[in-house]
Image (cartoon, helix red, strand yellow):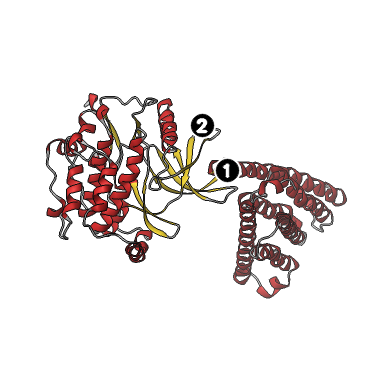
Amino acid sequence: MGSRSHFSDPESRAFLQRRVAAFGGVGAIIGLVATSFRLLISARFGDVAEELRNPDFLLQCLGVVPSAAMWLICRRGALEVRTIEVVETAGILLTAGLYIAMGSHIPAEVGADTITAFILSFILFARAVYVPSTVRRTILIGVAMGAPLVVTMYFHYLNSDYDWKDLGWGEVPESKEVVAAVSASVTTMWWTLVIGLASLATRVIHGLRQEVRDIKSLGQYTLERKLGEGGMGVVFQATHGMLKRPTAIKLMRQERVSLDAQARFRREVQLTAKLRHPHTVRIHDYGKTPDGVFYYAMELLEGATVREIVETVGPQPPARVAHILRDAALALNEAHSIGLIHRDIKPGNIMLAEQGGEFDVTKVLDFGLVKSTGADATDRTDANVVMGTPQYLSPEAIQDPVKVCPQSDLYALGAVGYYLLTGRHVFDGETVMEVCLKHLQSTPVPPSERCSEPIPAELEAVIMHCLEKSPDDRPSSGRAIAGVLEHAPIARWTREDAEAWWQRFGPLLESGGLEERVSATDNTLAVDLSVR
């Protein structure tokens, strides 16, 4: 009846079946409640035994059966769209027929047509709310319900024994015909309005559902749930329509849809797509919605960020810290080798994932502030704009953002290692400016002085080397850091260690762990110092 094409995919078909079941269930419940109230009223003001013998009461009870049948049938296994629509149509028309028959037993003089039309209009409006449909299908069902109503009420009033003289209708033989015609005309008028309003409700609700469906669909991808937010966009879990591959989709924030933001977002995906290192998040696809929202698809990672791990469990074993720093340093080394600087390395942008049965696979995320230093660089960083997360900004990123270099990322990586070992930032402060001044002027306290557990001297030396104030005094590259950690006499974080850790603490992370604590200095910022 005009809606089958809207439910061609399994997800939409299942949604239609659930909604028809809900409609039937609600209809049955309301019918039972109305019947119960009628019995209570009879017990209080009349005779229950007599009420139970009334044909209209029995018909009212039977009116619950088709709705209950709709619920029961649609609660079973998956049905074809045609079957669902047949069940829905039969259930509605049978229910309407029983209530119309009930109305034919209600005395005409008490407004049988009005009572019956009210019940049917309630059913039609409830269907418009619960069941996704087209306007055409709503009109056809409305007409199929209304035609028997008008005809039945016409003959009911025509055959009524009530003396219509009391209402000023004239002689009884003529009055019955006039009354029946008036009743049919009024019922037709009101039912036409009911169909119109129900069709309008169907169109609005169906349109909103379609808009939500369109919003949730980006080309071949269907958005499922929000995973988090980054500096430039929001990340959702999605599924590729053809490959059925779980994917993460990042959309650029609507409030940042400017030409500059679009260019930055486009540059982020184009530059990130150049990276092939196994410890860098992989980019699968890139696109733009019809209304101009940019997005890109990347591998969906199962695991937790370094920040989530430390906030939930606390400081990590030195062997694991060395493992994370080594892998992240190699990922950064590839980016630096092709002229890319991340500029926002922090605990929230390093993830420990489970892939292919391997635990603690380090992944560097979110190249939203990436800067290209190659000959084809399109970035035009303002000399007065500090970009990054205050707790992990290098001194040169604060003093002169134009001089940000690969060693700036290594400074932030050292700060991440410090956080992993101690559970604390290198520098804390009440304000962004206070934290930035400490990066410029203060000497970091060695991790061993802030940690109760012993820390290998070689690991602490690597971290402190990364935290030198001058870029020239830091390691020459991420590969150099990885090389030192690889050959240092530090216990190895094995596959068994990783698996045992996730078996123990994984459930705690999945349940949400400790309450998240976020301050202004934890977030990625872009601060224009020229207006300070």
Q: Is residue 121 above or below residue 251?
A: below
Q: Is residue 100 above or below residue 388?
A: below
Q: Taking the image as drawn, is residue 506 in sight?
A: yes
Q: Amino acid at mark 1?
A: Gln
Q: Which residue is mark 1?
A: 220
| Secondary-structure class at tag 2 | loop
| Secondary-structure class at tag 1 | loop
Q: Which residue is mark 2?
A: 292
Within-10-Å neighbours for mark 1: few <14, some 14–19, many 20+: few
Q: Nearer the viewer, mark 1 or mark 2?
A: 1
Image coords of residue 244 (percent x, y): 56, 51
In the shown orientation, is residue 233 left or right of residue 2? left
Q: Taking the image as drawn, is residue 191 in sight?
A: no
Q: Amino acid at mark 2?
A: Gly
In the shown orientation, is residue 72 left or right of residue 183? left
Q: Nearer the viewer, residue 80 or 406?
A: 406
Image coords of residue 65 (percent x, y): 70, 66
Within-10-Å neighbours for mark 2: few <14, some 14–19, many 20+: few
Q: Residue at x 60, y 43 (%)?
A: 210
Q: Which mark is residue 352?
A: none
In the shown orientation, is residue 269 left or right of residue 360? right
Image coords of residue 149 (percent x, y): 77, 52
Q: Nearer the viewer, residue 159 or 407?
A: 407
Quarter the C terminus occupies: top left
Spatial separation of the CA atoms under disc 1 and disc 2: 17 Å
Q: Residue at x 66, y 43 (%)?
A: 197
